[in-house]
Image (cartoon, helix red, strand yellow):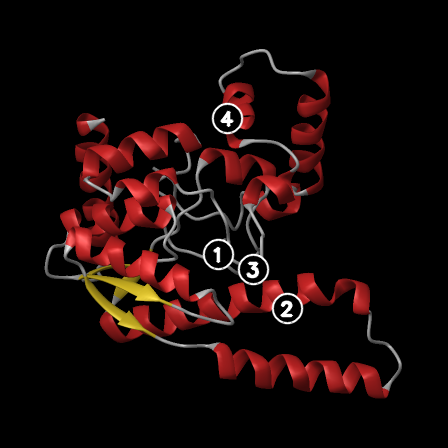
Amino acid sequence: MQENVNKLVEWLQQQVRDAGLDGLLVGVSGGVDSAVVAHLIKKAFPENSLAVILPCKSNPGDQDAAQKVIDSCGIEAVTVDLTETHNVLFSTIKDQLQSKNEYNEDQERLADANLRARLRMSTLYTLGTNYKYLVVGTDNAAEWYTGYFTKYGDGGVDLVPLLHFTKGEVRELARELGVPSEIVEKAPSAGLWEGQTDEKELGVSYDTIDKHLKGEEIPEDDKKVIEDLHKKTEHKRDIASAPPKF
């Protein structure tokens, strides 16, 4: 894993040089993937890296976890609370649709969550332009394969260093980098609503997805879930628009 860390750091440095920019930033959620990226970009650019906390109707525990990540690697950080911005925009859209009797309540939770992800993306790029930094994504191999990311939201980034690492390998990277153990072991969640977890939404565990990606045997029902997710999210992995991958 130390060799992987070294290669990732070198790759990140080269990407910034190629772009003619100054450094890197990442949105830090308090999860293991963004924690690993925060540690990596701090190593790549000790003086030119930034962690961004973006609360938006978020669980306060997520901010506490994000702060632990920041403290563990000593990266510069900024917090931009998007809750009010989101509420104004979402309510404006909702009011317009309701006035036309076209509001779909069944889609409200998903539309709300996706808007939060896309507001975060826009904020990261605004900060990136200010600092002349590239925006680094946090998707791992399992998330990319199943399409478990928001198109033009957390999928809207400049670089994707973890794309070829399974969730288990990301946890190994985290331990190698010194990410706090409570972050490494916590149940993966986008924090979109109370009790939400990645694996509940996916309908299959990360360990099972990892095994499938490695070519190992898994139950047929799980295989079908994974392949169905992969097929229906193909549009998210459009090669023409995909960012550089490590």
Type of amino acid at the residue the image marks with label 2: Asp
Q: Secondary structure at mark 2?
A: helix
Q: Secondary structure at mark 4?
A: helix
**Residue 110 image point, x, y percent:** 68, 61
Q: Is residue 152 left or right of residue 78?
A: right
Instruction: Name the residue rendered at 51%, 34% in the picture.
Output: 142
The tag earlier along the polypeptide, 3 or 4, is 3
Q: Quadrant of residue 177?
A: top left
Residue on which the image places disc 1 = 154
Which quadrant of the figure contains the C terminus? Answer: top left
**Residue 2 image point, x, y percent:** 17, 28
> Which residue is at the front of the view, 161 or 192?
192
Type of amino acid at the residue the image marks with label 1: Asp
Nearer to us of marks 2 and 3 is 3
Q: Using the image, tell me which numbered label, if any, was put on residue 207.
A: 4
Q: Using the image, tell me which numbered label, if any, was put on residue 192.
A: 3
Where 57 sits versus 154, above or below? below
Residue on which the image places disc 2 = 112
